[in-house]
Amino acid sequence: MRAELNGFHRGTTSRRLRALILLAMALEGSPKSLLAQTKWEPANQVRPKVTTTVQYDSVRRLWIYDYSVQNGGDAKQPIVELVFERPGNNVHLSAPAGWVSRSFPDSIDVPDEGRIAIPVPFMKFTVDAAWDESTGLLAATFANVVIQPGRSLGGFRLMSSDPPGDVVLHVRGFTPLTSEETSLPANLPTWLEDARTVVVRGPRRPM
């Protein structure tokens, strides 16, 4: 499955499989084949520290939010996804090289699939197609694109007419591909729960 769905897995019922296919199509495109992994890994084994710089462009009347993300040296996973929850209105995203940005103005609700339902509008930066399809692990070509433990990366930018406020940011790590053979925990976290969550300054939509 595409890196867009990093951390998602196939279930054991046709309903669950259809739900994942629907979500994959909604987020980007057709899902890839999944390789068998014997152990499910949470995507929250990262140690993010986010530095935010805020500027106001009086000519364009836009607030500019620049982010630099550091992954602590004790992290067990590289960072591959940043998800902004309830961002401001009319936000333009700019991503660093090797990353892509996408905006979802509406919630995603896949029937009977609580794990992948996303109840709020969100925007995301993600490393696209970072898996090696032959192993299910991180492709060597992406080793310097993801934010490895002990490294940092800037170039994440939001531009909006909305002024600064507190915005929830979910930071997710790379996890191997999974399949129906993967052993899953009894209390599987939802997609937004399966992340490290921090609060940053960002465009805050009016209440």
Image: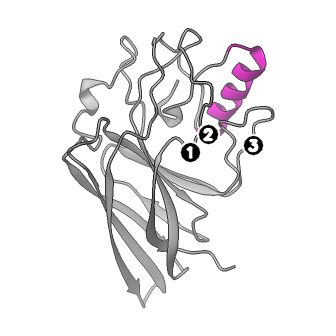
Residue at point 32% right, 49% down?
47
Left or right: residue 17 versus residue 195 is right
In which quadrant is the C terminus drawn?
Answer: bottom right
Furthest residue to the right?
Answer: 111
Q: Which mark is residue 88?
A: none
Q: Position of residue 108 (x, y in %)?
A: 71, 45
Residue 75, by quadrant, is top left
Which color scheme does this rendered protein use? one colour
77 left or right of 110 in image:
left
Residue type at mark 2? Thr
Q: Quadrant of residue 65?
A: bottom left
Query: Which residue is labeled 1 in the image?
Result: 193
**Picture coordinates of residue 92, whole percent (x, y):** 50, 65
**Nearer to us: label 3 or label 1:** 1
Residues under numbered marks 1 and 2 in contact, where contact means CB atoms less than 8 Å apart: yes
CA distance for labels 3 and 2: 12 Å
Secondary structure found at label 1? loop
- Whether residues under marks 3 and 1 lie with C-beta atoms below 8 angstroms apart, the answer is no
Amino acid type, mark 3: Asp
The residue beneath circle 2 is 190
Residue with the most extreme bottom position: 58
The residue positioned 24% from the left and 49% from the top of the image is 72
Residue 110 lies in magenta, yes or no? no
Q: Is residue 26 magenta?
A: yes
Which label number is shown at residue 109?
3
Establish if 107 lies above or below 67.
above
